[in-house]
Amino acid sequence: MKPTYYITTPIYYVNGAPHIGHAYTSIAADVLARFKRLDGYDVFFLTGTDEHGQKVEAAARAAGLDTQAYTDKISQDFRDMSDAMGVSYDDWIRTTEQRHKDSCAALWKKIEASGDIYLGHYEGWYAVRDEAFYDESELKTNDAGVKVAPSGAPVEWVREPSYFFKLSAWQDRLLQFYEEHPEFIAPSSRKSEVLSFVKGGLHDLSVSRTTFNWGIPVPDAPGHVMYVWLDALTNYITAAGFPNENADKWKFWPADVHFVGKDIIRFHAVYWPAFLMSAGIAPPTRISSHGWWVVDGEKMSKSLGNVVEPRALAKTFGLDQIRYFLLREKPFGADGSLNHQAIISRMNVELANDLGNLAQRSLSLIAKNLGGVLPARGPATEDDIALLDAANALPDMVRARMEQQTFHEALEDIWKVIRAANSYIDRQAPWALRKTDPERMAVVLRVLVDTMRVVATLLQPFMPESIAKMLDQLGVPGEARTLAALAVPLADGTVLPAPQGVFPRYVEPV
Ligand code: MSP
C-alpha cells in the first residue's frame, strides 16, 4: 500500500476576487502534491473556500446579493482560478456545505465534553478584516492617530455574550508539543514568533458570536454562531471524513502539511492544535508558512489598483512560466516583489536559454544526425560520469528540499545540473564530433538525454504542461515519468518525435 500524504491550502475568504497571493499558496501546495504523487504517495490535496463570518456577510451585503448566492458565485470564481492555474486538488471544500456543518458541530461537542468550553461575556477589540480578536497591548496607532490591528486592519470594540475556549489551560501542553515536534512550524523564524507568543501567556479565546448570524450554529445554544476561525480550521478534518473516523478518508489524518501565509500562522500553530488536542484528535504534522508578494514594491490594494489577477498574468507570460517564477524568485518563507521585468528575465534566461536551448540543441542533433533515434549508452569518459553523477544525485536532493518546502532551493539544485549540462555540451561540441568521431557524438547525446530526463522528471510538478511536452520529446513513456522509474534506463533505439521548442522567449507585444 502506498503511504498517505495529506496537503492543504488555507480556505480562501469569499469576500472578494482571487488574486496572485491566493494563487501562490495554492500553486506551492500543488507543486508538493504533484511531487509526492510522483514519489509514490497516495496524496490527498484539499483546497476550497471559507464562507462564514462578518467579513463575508458584509461583502455580500455590499454586492447587493443574498449571502448564500454571493458565496456560491465567489467560491466558483476561486475554483475556476485554481483550475486555470493547474491546481490539482482532490477535493474542493466549502464551509457552507452540510458535511462541514456536521463536522463543526461534532468537534464543538467533543471540546465541550472535555470541559474546555464555558459561557461568558466577551468585551474587547475585534478586527473584521482579520476576523481576529486583539488584546489592547497588541494594537498600534496608525498615521491618522487611530488604533488599528497589528495588520493595520480597523478594530471595533465588541461586547457580547460568548462561549470561550480555555486556551490558557493549553499553554504548557502546546509548548511541550512544539518541543516534541521541532518540525511543526516552518520556517524557523516563524517558529520563534509562535513560541514567544505562547510563552507570553495565552488568554481564553472567544469562540462564538451573537451579534450576527452568518455562521454555523453552536449546538444547543440559540443565538450563538461559531467563531469563523474555529469553523474554518475544522475544514481540514471535515474533508478527511470527520466525524466519521471510520471513513476511508480518515486514513489521511493527521495532515502532513498545512500551507499558510505568514499572517495566519497563529490560528494554525496555536489555536488549531489546542482545539484538536482538547477534542482528543492528533494535531497536524507541519504548518509551513510563506511570505507575501508585493507588486513593484507596493502592497497590493484595491485603492492602488495594483491587484494582480493570476489568470491574466498566466495569459501574458504562460502558466508554467508564472508557476516557475513564483517558486523560484524568492525563498518560500520570505516576502518578494512581483514585477514584469523579473518574470521576463527568468522566462528568457532560465527557461528559454538554459533549459529550452539545452533540449533543443541536443534533440535537434539527434534528429539531424541520428535519424531521431535514441542512441545507446557507450563507454563513459570522466566528463560524462561527472554530469551523470550530478543528475543522478538530484532526486534525493530535491526530495529533501521538498520535505522542507524550500522550493527555490530545489529549483536552484536542478538548475546547477542544467548549467553543468550546458557547459558539457559546449565542451564536448557534439556538432563537431559528427565528422571526427560519430560514435562519441552518439554517446555524448545519450548522456545529455539521460541528464535531461532526470531534470525533466523532477520539474514536472513545477511546470506540468511544458515538461510533459519535453518528456514526450525525450521519448519518456507516460508510465516512466515517476521518480522510481528513473532507475530503468530509456530503451535504446526509441524513436523520438521531431523536436519543438517548449519554452518560448518573451517577445514584447508591438
Ligand atoms: N480564510 C482564511 C484562511 C482560513 S484557513 C482555515 C484566510 N483567507 S484569505 O483569503 O484571506 O487568505 C488566504 C491565503 O492567501 C493566506 O495564506 C494569505 O497569506 C494568502 N495571501 C493573501 N495575500 C497575499 C499576498 N499578497 N502574498 C502572498 N500570499 C497572500 O486567511
Image (cartoon, helix red, strand yellow):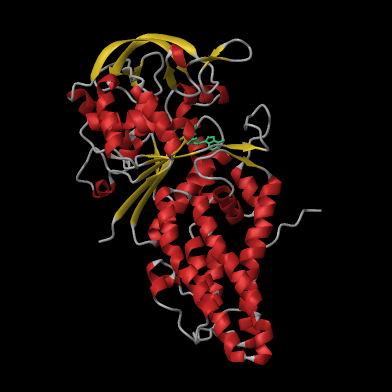
Total marks placed: 0
Q: Residue at x 24, y 32 (%)?
A: 277
Horizontal and vertical percent position of residue 407: 49, 51
| Residue 138 in the figure: left or right of residue 239 | right
Q: Name the residue at the right extreme.
A: 510
Q: Report which quarter residue 113 is drawn in.
A: top left
Q: Is residue 415 above or below residue 377?
A: above
Q: Is residue 131 above or below residue 95?
A: above
Is residue 182 or residue 122 the one in the foreground?
A: 182
Q: Residue at x 58, y 87 (%)?
A: 440
Q: Report which quarter residue 194 is drawn in.
A: top left
Is residue 308 or residue 98 the one in the foreground?
A: 308
Q: Residue at x 57, y 80 (%)?
A: 445
Q: Is residue 93 above or below residue 110?
A: below
Q: Is residue 421 in view? A: yes
Horizontal and vertical percent position of residue 269: 36, 33
Quadrant of the snapshot with the N terminus: bottom left
Is residue 83 or residue 454 the one in the foreground?
A: 454
Q: Report which quarter residue 303 is drawn in.
A: top right
| Residue 251 in the figure: left or right of residue 350 | left
Is residue 11 or residue 125 the one in the foreground?
A: 125
| Residue 23 in the figure: left or right of residue 186 | right
Q: Name the residue at the front extreme.
A: 382
Q: Is residue 13 in view? A: no
Horizontal and vertical percent position of residue 337: 63, 40
Horizontal and vertical percent position of residue 41: 33, 58
